[in-house]
Amino acid sequence: MFRSIRTLAAVVLASTALVACSDDSDTTAPAQIAQVRVVHASPDAPNVDVLVDDATALTNVAFRASSGFLEVPAGARRLRVRATGSTTTVIDATVPFANGGAYTVLATGLLASIAPVVAEDNLTDPAAGQVKLRVIHAAPAAAGVDVYATAPGADINAATPVLTNVGFRAVSDYLVVPAGTYQLRVTPTGTKTVAIDATVTLTAGQIRTVVAKDAVGGGAPLAAVVLADKN
């Protein structure tokens, strides 16, 4: 469980409003806002707090948990990740967010080498009857992987992967596929040995991100977490 500070944009923008109040001009430009979602994907890290600039955005985020989209001021934002209740920062990165953009930020890797991955989200609707699906490889126990998306029960020995040699911390492009039920299987590149097996049902218009993650503490069994980007 975690607590989300939904008024984050207002908190951060308020810090700049004091400066604006000293200006005699009555013209106020519209706020420039980006949407940011945070995912805890470091398997041996404790629960964490997330700060944007000096404002607390999320608290007590557990491994494999993800936030919804939070509104933050557009521009270069300082993101910090700390063990919950401490002042020890394990990630400290400045990330540019475009006005109107949407982003998924993941804390990835084992704690000793934890690092952020910033993925730009494409929330443009797919064509009628279609869905959009992408994969983020956030499982440090696996090197390159292949991804199969088949009808449930299909033999992958006779199938071609939809994504090949996806490296750790890589973000695939969105695949546009017909709505329906798919069995997603992830294998080490060049093999048919299934490391992740998940079945998802996707309805027309949905946009989804599948994140491959380690077990708690690191290593196998790997698992897939499906994030709802839109619809």
Image (tube, rainbow, N blue to C red):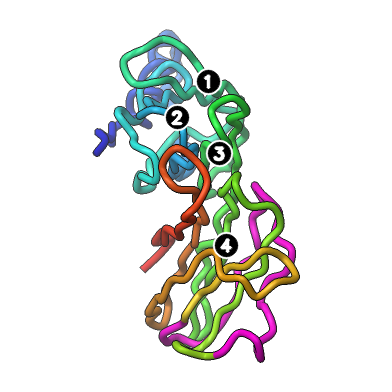
| Foreground of the two, 10 or 217 | 217
Give the class, few, some or many, for how many residues have Cα within 10 Å of label 4's Cα (few <14, many ≥20).
many
Which residue in the structure is indicated by mark 2?
45
* Residue 158 part of the magenta-drawn span: yes
Look at the numbered disc 3 and give the secondary structure of its residue. Answer: strand
Mark 1 or mark 2: which comes first in sequence?
2
- Indicate the amino acid at tag 3: Thr
Mark 4 or mark 3: which comes first in sequence?
3
- Indicate the amino acid at tag 2: Ala
Count the numbered circles shown: 4
Seen at 44% across and 37% down, the residue is 217
Question: Which of the numbered marks, if any, corresponds to residue 108?
Answer: 3
Vertical placement of residue 84 versus 228, above or below = above
Which residue in the structure is indicated by mark 4?
135
Mark 1 or mark 2: which is in front?
Answer: 2
- Indicate the amino acid at tag 4: Val
Q: Position of residue 68 (x, y in %)?
A: 35, 48
Which residue in the structure is indicated by mark 1?
90
Q: Quadrant of the N terminus?
A: top left
- The answer to whether one can see residue 4 in this image is yes
Give the class, few, some or many, for how many residues have Cα within 10 Å of label 3's Cα (few <14, many ≥20).
many
Look at the numbered disc 4 and give the secondary structure of its residue. Answer: strand
Determine the image quadrant of residue 30.
top left
- Indicate the amino acid at tag 1: Val
Query: Marks 2 and 3, Cα distance to the nearest angstrom?
Result: 10 Å
Query: Marks 4 and 1, Cα distance to the nearest angstrom?
Result: 25 Å
Mark 2 or mark 4: which is in front?
Answer: 2
